[in-house]
Image (tube, rainbow, N blue to C red):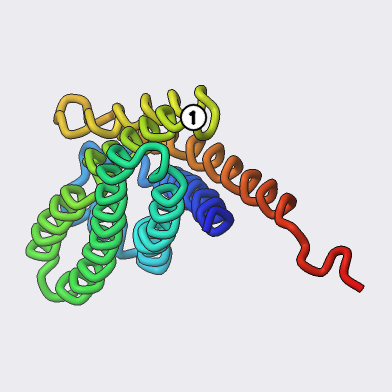
Amino acid sequence: MQKVGGIAALFEALAYVVGFVVMATLLNPGETSGWSPEQKLAFILERKAIFQPWTLFIYVAFGIALVPLVAALGDRLKIKSPELTSLATPFGLIWAGLVIASGMVASVGLEAMSTMHSTNSALAASAWMTISIVQDGLGGGVEIVGGTWVLLISAAALRSREFSRSLNYIGLAIGACGILTVVPSLGDLGTIFGLGQILWFVLIGTAMLRGAAANNSFKPNPHRGSA
């Protein structure tokens, strides 16, 4: 379980990196302050072959991989910190569901807008704005659920003396940033949350894989010493 969780954590970090890189390059429209909603939707539709796989990877695949990570961390921390772990685990699973739903709304919504755009571009652009708001509300813009999970699981790890203290303090800070994105004026903290998550996922995944390797090395060999 710890090995699977460690691999899942590293995958989450990869998903964030891919998300930021593609958004800054292939899906970067540049200055859009003077664009109409129709122009913004047209830009995305022209890159539909990139946008949909990208969305499915950074949301749906991310959410699926999050489930074994949440389970592995819960399994590791539940003995020494049962109260905090029992609170953290549901938030992690809820986050996974919201992220998957967010990605599916964006992907399915764009497919529908692609059909509508050919007949009524203004209506399609208006509908896409509504879809984007729903998608952001589910998990594309507000990170309160993910932030709560990271904060609680880091607090549980700190109390259990699992992982390093510095890693757990990093998790507490990142989790707090995610929670604060619920305040509209602090929405930019979502970028800090995302970038910080890359570091946290790499560190937590590496620690879990090292722990799994160490545990395996101490397992007794039932065939050792046999005739």
Q: In this view, does 157 lie above or below 208?
A: above
Badge 1 is on which residue? 161
Query: Which type of secondary structure does the marked residue at label 1 adopt?
Result: loop
The amino acid at mark 1 is Arg
Q: Is residue 25 visible?
A: no
- Relative to residue 147, is residue 126 drawn left or right? left
Quadrant of the frame with the C terminus: bottom right
Task: Please rate how many residues cluster around mark 1, counting C-alpha atoms within 10 Å: few if below 14, some from 14 to 19, many from 20.
Answer: some
Q: Where is residue 5 in the image (x, y as percent from the top left)?
A: 50, 54
Q: Residue at image x 59%, y 40%? A: 207
Q: In this view, does 74 lie above or below 45?
A: above
Q: Residue at image x 23%, y 58%? A: 41
Q: How many labels does the image show?
A: 1
Q: Residue at image x 29%, y 55%? A: 93
Q: In this view, does 93 lie above or below 181?
A: below
Q: Position of residue 7 (x, y in %)?
A: 56, 55
Q: Looking at this view, is 204 or 129 the one in front?
A: 204
Q: Where is residue 193 in the image (x, y as percent from the top left)?
A: 36, 33
Instruction: Using the rendered view, name the quadrant where residue 197 is placed.
Output: top left
Q: Looking at this view, is 181 or 113 the one in front?
A: 181
Q: Residue at image x 76%, y 67%? A: 222
Instruction: Using the rendered view, name the quadrant where residue 112 is placed.
Output: bottom left
Q: Is residue 106 visible?
A: yes
Q: Looking at this view, is 224 or 101 the one in front?
A: 224
Instruction: Using the rendered view, name the quadrant where residue 143 is placed.
Output: top left
Q: Position of residue 138 (x, y in %)?
A: 19, 52
- Relative to residue 32, is residue 137 drawn left or right? left
